[in-house]
Image (cartoon, coloured by chain):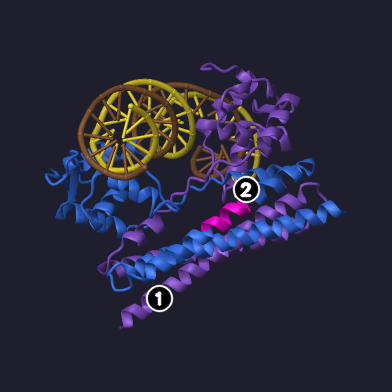
Chain colours: A purple, B blue, C yellow, D brown
Amino acid sequence: MIREGAAGMKKSSTLFAVLGVLSKAPSSGYDIRRQFTESLRYFWSESYGQIYPVLKEAVQLGYAVMQQDSTDSRNKKLYRITPAGEECFRSWLAEPVNPLNYRDELLLKVFFAKPEDQESIRTLFEREEAELVQAKEAYLEQERQLKLRMEEADYPMWVLTLRYGILSTEARLQWCRESIAFLTSMREK
Amino acid sequence: MIREGAAGMKKSSTLFAVLGVLSKAPSSGYDIRRQFTESLRYFWSESYGQIYPVLKEAVQLGYAVMQQDSTDSRNKKLYRITPAGEECFRSWLAEPVNPLNYRDELLLKVFFAKPEDQESIRTLFEREEAELVQAKEAYLEQERQLKLRMEEADYPMWVLTLRYGILSTEARLQWCRESIAFLTSMREK
DNA sequence: ATACCCATGTAAAAAGTTACATGATTAG
DNA sequence: CTAATCATGTAACTTTTTACATGGGTAT
C-alpha cells in the first residue's frame, strides 16, 4: 500500500500544537503565536511561517473553521476547532510520543572541550546559571499566578507542566553549580 | 554589508559537531555517525544526509583533509582535522551557546489534555517512566565504563556530561512518578 | 548462500526560520 | 506625530530527515 487517504496522511506535530491551542479557545494566527511565545515557550515554539499555513491546512482538512471577527476593528480572523478537529486531536493525545530530538549545544561543547578550554567552558556555565536563575524565577511567578486559578478545569494539567519546568530547571542549575565548583577545584591544582 | 567572506560565513552547528568528533580522532563519515548514535545520542544527533556534505564542506574550508585509508580493505575515507579547523572549533567553543530550541511532545500533550484525557496521559507517563528507567541504567553502565578510563585527559569533561545525563533523567523520572501519583489521586476521587 | 554489518553517498521531501511587505490601531 | 503593538501573510532560505542506490566484508 503506497497511497494513503487523507485520514491516514502523516500530520506534522505543528498541526497538533495549533489544534491544541484552538481546543482551548478560538484564536487568530497572532493569538496562537502569542500562546507559544508566552505560556509554552519553555517547551514548544512555532513561527508565523508555520502557523498560518497550518491554519489553512486545518480548514482544508475540516478540523477548523474560520470566521472574520466582526467585533474587531482590525480584520482579525478567528479560527474555531470543529468536532472532527477535536476528535483528531484527542486521538493524537493518546498516541505514544515521538522520540524527543534533543540537541544541546552546551552539552556538545562540554563534551568536546579540552583541558585548555576550561576557562571558556566555565564562562558558558556561568552564563547558563544566570539564565536558569531567571527562568526559575519566572516559573515561581507563574506558580503564584496559577494559584489564583485553582478553580479552572485545566488547573491540574497546568500544575503538572509547571512542575516539570521547576524540576528540570533545578536539575540543570544544580549541574551548572556542581560543574563550576568542579572546574574551580581543577584550576586550583 | 551584504556579502561576507568565507571567514565570516555563518556556519551550522552540524559543522562544529563534526569538527568536534574529528578533534578527538581522525574518522570516516561512518565513524562520525556511530559517535553520534552511541556516545552522544542523549544530547545530539546527526544523520548521514548531513554528515557527508559537511565533511566535504570542511575540506573546502580548509578545516579538514581527507585521505583514503590504505590499511582498510573497504575504501574507507579518513578525515583529519587541520590546525585551522582546530582553531575554528576552539573559538566556537568559547562563543555563547544558541538558545536551546526545545520541543517536548509529552509536555505539549500534558498541557493540552482535558479531564477526559487523564487515562491517555497516564499511559504516556508510564511509558515514559519505563524509558527513563532504561536510560538511567544505561547512564550508570556508562559511569562504570568511564571509571576505567580515569587517566585519560578527556575524563573530567566526560564526567560532567554524564553527570548531566543522570541529573536530568532523575528529574524527569521524579516528575513522571509524581504525575502518576497525582493522576491516581484524582481518579480515586 | 544469506544475512548483517561496514561504508559512501544523493535526491527529494519535510520541517522550520528569517526577513520582508503591508497596513490598521493605540498609547505616549 | 511617532513608536509600539496588533494583525496577516509569503518567499527564500536553511536545516534535517528519509529513503534509496550501491557494493565489499564477515560470520553462520
For the residue marked with disc 1, what is the amino acid? Phe
Q: Residue furthest right?
A: B189
The quarter of the displayed image where residue A10 is located: top right
Q: Residue at x 81, y 49 (%)?
A: A152
Find the distance from the CA under tag 1 to the CA under tag 2.
Answer: 32 Å
Q: Residue at x 65, y 28 (%)?
A: A76
Q: Nearer the viewer, residue B180 or B136?
A: B136
Q: Nearer the viewer, residue B93 or B23?
A: B23
The tag on residue B107 is 2
Answer whether residue B10 is visible to the viewer in this image: no
- Is residue A186 part of the magenta span, yes or no? no
Callouts 1 and 2 on one subunit: no
Q: Which residue is mark 1?
A: A182
Q: Which chain is disc 1 placed on?
A: A
Mark 1 and mark 2 residues within 8 Å of each other at the beta carbon:
no
Q: Which chain is disc 2 placed on?
A: B
> Where does the magenta region start and end?
B127-135
Relative height, residue D11 to residue B61 (above, below): above
For the residue marked with disc 2, what is the amino acid? Leu
Relative height, residue D13 to residue B16 (above, below): above
